[in-house]
Amino acid sequence: MIDLTGPPRPWSPRLAQRFAHCQQEALRTPEWWRGPAPFGEPELRDRLAELFGAPPERTVVTGGVRQFATVWAVVAPASVPEAGRAPMVVEVPTFADVPEIMGAAISVEARAWSNLGAVPQIVPLWLTNPFRNPDGRSLGPEQISVLADRIAAGVPVVINEVYRWYGRPGPVPEGAWIVTSLAKLVGPGVRLGWFVAPDAASIARPLTSDGPPTAWQRCWARFLDAHTINALRSDIVEATLDAKRAFLQQLTGTPEWQGNSPHLTVAHSTMDEPTALRRLADAGVRASPGAAFRTPIAALRLAFSGVTVAEAAEAARVFAKVGGFSPVLFD
């Protein structure tokens, strides 16, 4: 079975061996069993600043995007008292876990990017950039202008950069919250991410209370360096993009659809999602339903992190044989 649901790509043996060495080193550091520093272990925050320009005084290490979303849903509305019980706005389409997680704490409303200008000015926003999941869109000038106006009015805006590893994050308005993780680079089991706040005063205590274990942070501080990032980009990112291009070349003859997005969305001219998924599975290909990403029409999400170039090309031949599929973008 060719799996286009997006399982993580395995690490190379050389990276796995080096990581194991870093783990052992971290467990030899003094008092690794104590609680982590509130903003994250200093050596890890310094490494994030060195590699990614994350200013230490405004950066907090987290367990990932989901963990940040859980707390931010409580903290953000409280920072805009005039919002009252107005719902927080989350982009649509999007990975359904995010609005469900935040919806446990506050009312959440889904809005298409094309409709952001109609959102009341007092309402916090959550968007993904670059390469929104599932269709791979990135913010354009119109959306950035809307966000800049909202930030200028003192309303929190979060930009989820979880796919930053596949291309430059691009311009975002100054004053936005930036959250990311290593999940789409090294695998979701790592449970390590960070956010950058607009200023240190914005970092409420609940946002600093749930960092990963001390030894884990120290391990990653040792493991992450420019050489490792380059190796991961080669082994994981480039291999994933090569597979996507092979799929598109075989299916459409246009290998650069949505640039470096590691995923894409396809729609069928007449078939509903369950039927399409069943037809593809019968032919040896797994895909994800658009319903898992709240797509406005019946669609499938295809991700290429778990397949080779040859497997991606074969999957495209299956799609062509079933017929009727084409890439699609949403507003």
Image (cartoon, rainbow, N blue to C red):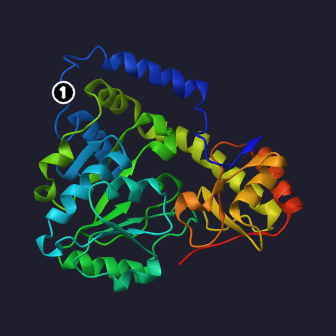
Residue 273: x percent and y percent?
A: 69, 62
Q: Is residue 186 above or below residue 125?
A: above
Residue under label 1: 35
Q: On the rendered structure, is 88 left or right of 296?
A: left
Residue sitting at x 28%, y 28%: 213
- Residue 318: x percent and y percent? 85, 54
The residue sitting at 48% across, 63% down in the picture is 94
Instruction: Report the residue at 89% width, 60% height from top.
Output: 321
Q: Nearer the viewer, residue 47 or 260?
A: 260
Q: Secondary structure at mark 1?
A: loop
Asked where in the image residue 35 lies, by quadrant, the reply is top left
Amino acid carrying label 1: it is Gly
- Residue 41, placed above or below residue 77: above
Residue 201 sits in which quadrant?
bottom left
Compared with 10, 252 (above or below) is below
Horizontal side of 188 relative to 297 (left or right) equals left
Query: Is residue 47 or residue 300 the one in the foreground?
Result: 300
Residue in the foreground of this view, choosing between 3 and 271: 271
Query: Is 176 left or right of 5, judged from the image as shown?
Result: left
